[in-house]
Image (tube, rainbow, N blue to C red):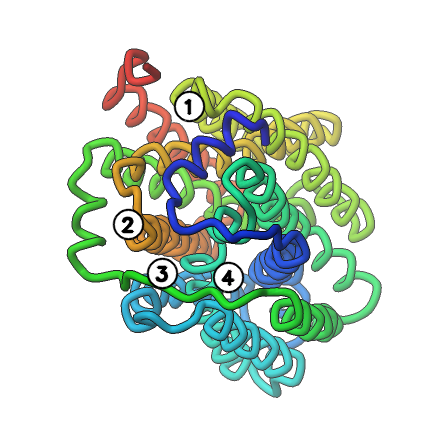
C-alpha cells in the first residue's frame, strides 16, 4: 500500500503510541495474520480432495469455508465486547492457541462432521483476531511510523488470503488434504510463539460497548460500504470457493495446471493489492468501483470461455488483480467511514463490524455457491456469482457520487 492509503487507515485507529518502536511485534502480528488467512482459505484448493476423502459432495465440502466465516462474523463483535479491558497481548495469545487446536483437530478429523467442528473453532479465533489484531500497527510504533507498520500487517493479511487456496491445491495434488492442515498447525505454533515472545503489554483504557457499535452504523458512508461489501463478497466467494472444481471438471485443466493457475492468481493479486494501495487513499470510490467492476467482467464470461485455455488464463489474471485490489479499497473506505471515532474503543467497534460483515459475506457466498453447484452445475454458479458482483458495482455507483472523493 502507499503511505496515503495507509495514513487514511491509521487516522481512524487512535490509541496511545509507545515510547519505543516494537517492530518485532509488528512482524509477529503480520505473520500471525498471514497464518490465520492461509488457514481460512486453504480448503478452497482442497475441496475436491476433501469431498473424495470423506465421501461428501463438493457442495457440502464448501462448509469448510462457510462455517468459519459464519462463526467469525459472530465472534468478532462478541469477543470485542466480552474482552473488556483484558490485555490484548494475552487475548491474542488465547486466540493463537485456538488456531493451533483447530488445525490439529482438522488434520486428525476422522469424519466430515469433526472437520466442520474444527473449522467452527477456527472461525471463533479468526473473528477475534481480525477484530483485535488487524489495527495494532498504530499502537506498536510511534505516530510517524504507524503507516508503515499498518502496511506490513495488511501485507500479511493479503498474502494469506491469496496464498491459501493455491497452497491447498498444490498440497492436495502432491500429498493429501490432511497434510495441508498439518502444515498450518506447524505454522500456527510458530505464530503463537512469535506473538507471545514479541508483543509488549497492550492494556486497554476504554472498553468497547454496544453504543460504540451503533455509533459506527449511524454514518451513511458506513452503511453504504457495508452493503456494497456484502454483495460483492457474496459474489466473489460464490465463485472463488468453487473455482478448483470449475477448472478441473468444466475447463479440463489437470491438477498441476490448476495449482499453477491459482499461484498465478496469487501473484497478480498481490500486485493488485499494491496498485490499489497507491490510489485508494485519494480516489477511494474510483478504486473500489474499478476493482468490483473488473471482478464482474472477468467472472461473468468465465464459463463461456471454458473451452479456450488462453481465454480462461486471461480472465483469471484480471480476476486475480481485481480481487487483490478490492479488500484494500474496502479497508480504506471503511477507515474513512470510522474517521470520526478518534479513540481506541471506536476503532475496535468499527473493525468488529467490518469483520462481521466480511466473514458473514464469505460464509453466505460459499453456501450460496454450493447450492448453485449442486443444483445447476459449477459453470452456471460462476455466471450467477459474477452477476452478483455486477449488482454490487451498480449499487456503489448509484448510492455514491464522485463528489464523495472530496
Left or right, 134 with respect to 245, comes to: left
Q: Mark 2 vs mark 3: which is more N-terminal? A: 3
Q: Residues within 10 Å of mark 3 (few under 14, many from 20)?
A: many
Q: Mark 1 vs mark 3: which is more N-terminal? A: 3
Asked whether the viewer can see residue 398, the reply is yes
Looking at the image, residue 366 lies above or below residue 280: below
Question: Residue at label 3?
Answer: 73
Q: Pointer 1 and pointer 3: residues touching (CB < 8 Å)?
A: no
Asked whether the viewer can see residue 47, the reply is no
Question: Residue at label 2?
Answer: 346
Q: Residues within 10 Å of mark 4 (few under 14, many from 20)?
A: many
Left or right, 80 with respect to 278, comes to: left
Looking at the image, residue 219 lies above or below residue 404: below
Q: Mark 2 vs mark 4: which is more N-terminal? A: 4
User: Please, what secondary structure does the residue beneath circle 2 have?
Assistant: helix
Question: Residue at label 1?
Answer: 284
User: Please, what secondary structure does the residue beneath circle 4 have?
Assistant: helix
Left or right, 216 with respect to 320, comes to: left
**Residue at figure coordinates x 21%, y 53% from the top left:** 212
Q: CA distance from mark 2 to mark 4?
A: 30 Å
Total of numbered circles in the picture?
4
Amino acid at each position: 500500500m502507499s503511505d496515503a492509503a495507509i495514513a487514511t487507515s491509521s487516522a481512524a485507529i487512535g490509541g496511545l503510541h509507545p515510547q519505543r518502536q516494537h517492530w518485532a511485534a509488528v512482524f509477529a502480528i503480520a505473520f500471525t495474520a498471514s497464518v490465520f488467512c492461509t488457514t481460512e482459505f486453504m480448503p478452497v484448493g482442497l475441496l475436491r480432495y476433501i469431498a473424495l476423502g470423506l465421501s461428501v459432495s463438493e457442495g457440502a465440502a464448501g462448509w469448510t469455508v462457510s462455517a468459519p466465516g459464519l462463526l467469525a462474523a459472530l465472534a468478532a463483535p462478541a469477543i470485542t465486547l466480552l474482552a473488556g479491558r483484558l490485555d490484548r497481548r494475552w487475548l491474542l495469545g488465547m486466540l493463537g492457541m485456538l488456531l493451533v487446536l483447530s488445525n490439529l483437530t482438522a488434520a486428525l478429523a476422522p469424519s466430515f462432521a469433526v472437520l466442520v467442528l474444527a473449522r467452527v473453532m477456527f472461525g471463533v479465533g479468526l473473528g477475534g483476531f481480525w477484530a483485535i489484531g488487524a489495527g495494532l500497527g498504530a499502537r506498536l510504533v510511534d505516530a510517524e511510523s504507524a503507516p508503515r507498520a499498518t502496511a506490513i500487517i495488511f501485507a500479511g493479511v493479503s498474502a494469506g488470503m491469496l496464498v491459501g487456496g493455491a497452497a491447498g491445491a498444490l498440497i492436495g495434488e502432491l500429498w493429501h488434504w490432511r497434510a495441508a492442515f498439518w502444515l498450518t498447525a506447524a505454522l500456527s505454533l510458530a505464530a503463537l510463539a512469535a506473538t507471545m515472545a514479541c508483543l509488549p503489554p497492550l492494556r486497554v483504557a476504554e472498553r468497547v460497548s454496544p453504543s460504540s457499535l451503533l455509533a459506527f452504523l449511524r454514518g451513511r458512508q458506513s452503511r453504504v460500504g457495508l452493503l456494497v461489501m456484502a454483495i460483492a463478497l457474496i459474489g466473489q466467494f460464490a465463485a472463488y470457493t468453487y473455482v478448483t472444481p470449475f477448472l478441473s471438471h468444466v475447463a479440463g485443466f489437470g491438477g498441476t495446471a490448476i495449482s499453477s493457475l491459482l499461484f498465478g492468481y496469487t501473484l497478480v493479486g498481490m500486485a493488485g493489492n499494491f496498485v490499489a494501495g497507491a490510489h485508494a487513499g485519494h480516489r477511494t470510490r474510483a478504486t473500489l468501483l474499478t476493482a468490483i467492476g473488473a471482478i464482474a467482467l472477468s467472472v461473468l464470461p468465465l464459463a463461456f470461455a471454458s473451452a479456450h485455455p488462453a481465454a480462461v488464463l486471461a480472465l483469471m489474471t484480471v480476476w486475480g488483480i481485481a480481487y487483490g485490489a478490492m479488500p484494500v479499497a474496502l479497508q480504506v473506505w471503511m477507515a474513512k467511514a470510522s474517521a470520526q471515532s478518534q479513540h481506541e474503543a471506536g476503532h475496535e467497534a468499527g473493525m468488529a463490524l467490518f469483520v462481521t460483515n466480511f466473514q458473514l459475506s464469505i460464509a453466505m457466498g460459499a453456501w450460496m455457491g454450493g447450492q448453485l453447484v449442486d443444483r445447476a452445475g459449477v459453470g452456471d454458479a460462476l455466471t450467477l456469482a459474477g452477476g452478483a458482483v455486477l449488482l454490487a458495482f451498480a449499487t456503489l455507483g448509484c448510492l455514491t457520487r464522485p463528489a464523495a472523493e472530496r
